[in-house]
């Protein structure tokens, strides 16, 4: 971080603490009401915990934050993502929200999401998947239920059951196959809300396959449906690990615990000679996990059988001889946030 960036962050933090939390009477940072500010290319992102605040107070704080931080030098835009704890009086069982994320595309995040969900279901849990990758939905293909549209009951979408004990809601079930989804951030965020607000009562887990990156859809997810924990997927490649680090930083800033880091495409065994090669590098994700102080959940190799089965809509985790995904799912199931 440059000295100029440090000055800007300090100025933003000071401006935040000039705004008073109505409950504790302390500044927003000092009270823990707001997470430390993040800035990139002049765009400031603020995570604001609005638990216990009414709509009028929430709107007032948002306006004060935008005005106060927007006046700081070097700031072109201020975005406020509001979160709240999901503690309520309802006795209806709500699923544990598990976000699966990556800092960049092409690392196999959706395949990992599918197979962790299927492996959790094989362990006896009731599991749903939300395909939040609005612009590139692939879960209908991965779960073998392409072409089946969801119905709605009482204005809530009903998840579509797959042959593998996992139910799904995805934009890929609603738009025509191959149709481009040219939506801006707010529209994508509203579509995501419809999927997450589906009829998921009674489920144990809801695995949310997020789009790659740290943009509007991810911010909307954290704002409206704060995950209980996040799984980060990366390849061993240095560039992928740099982007995964950004994803971890986003969740840390938002107060979302990191369940762990998975290294995908880790080593390729030649089907002819049996020699192992590492086209994307070796051990990078595990080393990064140690540096970032997050758990390392394990590796998934670059195997032709995984690709072929996934393209055919037959998740490898559904097989009795699965040796990769059951172990990952067991670690996710055993995870509990630190108190």
Image: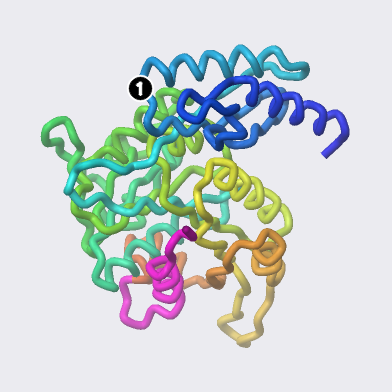
Q: Position of residue 133 (x, y in %)?
A: 44, 42
Q: Is residue 328 magenta?
A: yes
The quarter of the picture where the N terminus appears is: top right
Examine the image and state in which quarter residue 74 appears: top right
Examine the image and state in which quarter residue 233 appears: bottom right
Q: Residue at x 17, y 48 (%)?
A: 91
216 relative to 323 in the view: left or right: right
Nearer-the-camera pick, 84 or 261: 84
Element marked by disc 1: loop
Q: Categorize mark 1 by other alpha carbons within 10 Å: few (<14), some (14-19), many (20+).
A: few
**Farthest right residue?**
3
Examine the image and state in which quarter residue 132 appears: top left
Magenta region, residue range = 318-339
Q: Is residue 105 above or below residue 324?
A: above
Q: Which colour assignment does the render follow? A: rainbow
Q: Residue at x 55, y 46 (%)?
A: 251
- Return the residue at label 1: 54
Q: Position of residue 249 (x, y in %)?
A: 63, 46
Nearer-the-camera pick, 211 or 308: 211
**Farthest front residue?**
25
136 relative to 266 in the view: left or right: left
Q: Residue at x 43, y 21 (%)?
A: 58
């Amino acid at each position: 971080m440059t000295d100029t960036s440090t000055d800007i962050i300090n100025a933003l933090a000071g401006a935040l603490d000039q705004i008073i939390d109505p409950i504790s009477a302390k500044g927003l940072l000092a009270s823990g009401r707001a997470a430390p500010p993040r800035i990139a290319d002049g765009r400031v992102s603020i995570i604001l915990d609005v638990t216990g605040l009414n709509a009028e107070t929430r709107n007032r704080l948002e306006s004060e934050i935008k005005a106060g931080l927007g006046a700081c030098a070097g700031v072109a835009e201020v975005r406020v993502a509001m979160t709240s704890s999901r503690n309520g009086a309802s006795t209806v069982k709500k699923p544990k929200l598990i976000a699966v994320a990556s800092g960049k595309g092409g690392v196999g995040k959706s395949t990992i999401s599918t197979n962790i969900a299927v492996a959790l279901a094989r362990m006896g849990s009731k599991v749903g998947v939300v395909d939040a990758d609005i612009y590139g939905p692939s879960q209908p293909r991965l779960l073998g239920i392409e072409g089946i549209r969801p119905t709605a009951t009482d204005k809530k979408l009903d998840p579509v059951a797959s042959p593998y004990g996992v139910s799904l809601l995805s934009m890929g079930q609603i738009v025509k196959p191959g149709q481009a989804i040219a939506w801006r951030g707010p529209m994508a965020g509203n579509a995501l809300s419809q999927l997450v607000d589906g009829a998921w009562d009674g489920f144990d887990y809801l695995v949310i396959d997020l789009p790659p990156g740290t943009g509007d859809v991810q911010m909307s997810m954290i704002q409206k449906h704060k995950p209980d924990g996040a799984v980060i997927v990366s390849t061993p490649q240095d560039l992928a690990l740099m982007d995964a680090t950004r994803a971890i930083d986003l969740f840390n800033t938002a107060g979302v615990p990191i369940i762990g880091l998975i290294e995908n495409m880790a080593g390729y065994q030649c089907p002819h000679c049996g020699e192992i090669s590492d086209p994307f590098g070796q051990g990078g994700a595990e080393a990064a996990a140690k540096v970032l102080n997050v758990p390392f959940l394990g590796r998934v190799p670059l195997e032709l059988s995984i690709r072929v089965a996934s393209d055919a809509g037959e998740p490898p985790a559904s097989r009795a001889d699965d040796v990769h995904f059951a172990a990952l799912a067991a670690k996710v199931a055993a995870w509990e946030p630190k108190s």
